[in-house]
Image (spheres, grey):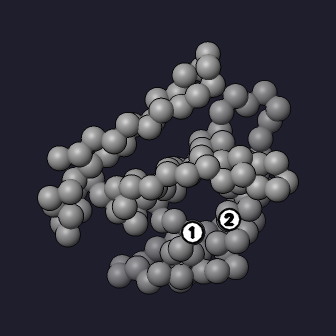
Amino acid sequence: LLLSQNPEQQGQLHVPVKVFEQCVSLDNLVALSISVFHHSYLWLESDVAVSFRRHIEKTSDIALMGHQHYGHDFYKHNSTGERVLYIEAPALQGENYAKTSSFRVLVVDWETQQEKLVTFRR
């Protein structure tokens, strides 16, 4: 199964990691690299999730993802030196989450090289 299906099954999704590895790399001149993907690693087949996560953490400063519908953010510091800010989005207008609609805005200050995450809730 490639990418997604309806209904989706957790742990069954695949992404073309080899294509990403061949086509996406970081140049030394890149100031900020942001990856955006809908399904978290939890939804991918386990071996694919490990490869995809490894690629994201080699090529991204910030990883934005959704689908879990619970807002959560954290920094991951790998022993190999990579540091990634993971931001998981809450539900915006999910039919099962109508009373908890929210979204997040990420503000990056280029001068201080710091970010601020702001959450708006209904």
- Density class for disc 2 (Cα within 10 Å; few <14, some 14-19, many ≥20) is many
Indicate whether 67 appears above or below 73: below
- In the image, taking residue 115 as reference, residue 28 lies left or right, namely right
Label 1: which secondary element: helix
Q: Quadrant of residue 94?
A: bottom left
The mark that comes first in sequence, 1 or 2, is 1
Kind of residue at badge 2: Phe
Q: Quadrant of residue 8?
A: bottom left
Indicate whether 60 appears above or below 65: above
Residue 19 visible: no
Q: Are the residues at dot 1 and dot 2 in contact (C-beta closer than 8 Å)?
A: yes
Q: Quadrant of the N terminus?
A: bottom right
On the image, numbered disc 1 is attached to which residue?
Answer: 41
- In the image, taking residue 105 as reference, residue 52 lies left or right, namely right
Who is closer to the viewer here, 69 or 24? 69
Who is closer to the viewer here, 67 or 102? 102
Tell me where residue 71 appears, x and y as whole percent.
39, 55
* Between marks 1 and 2 in the image, the one whose residue lies nearer the viewer: 1
Residue in the image at 66% along x and 48% along y:
84
On the image, numbered disc 2 is attached to which residue?
Answer: 52
Kind of residue at badge 1: Tyr
Residue in the image at 68% along x and 65% along y:
52
Residue 46 visible: yes
Tell me where residue 43 appears, x and y as whole percent.
51, 75
Tell me where residue 68 appears, x and y as whole percent.
40, 66
Indicate whether 122 appears above or below 30: below
What is the number of callouts on the image? 2
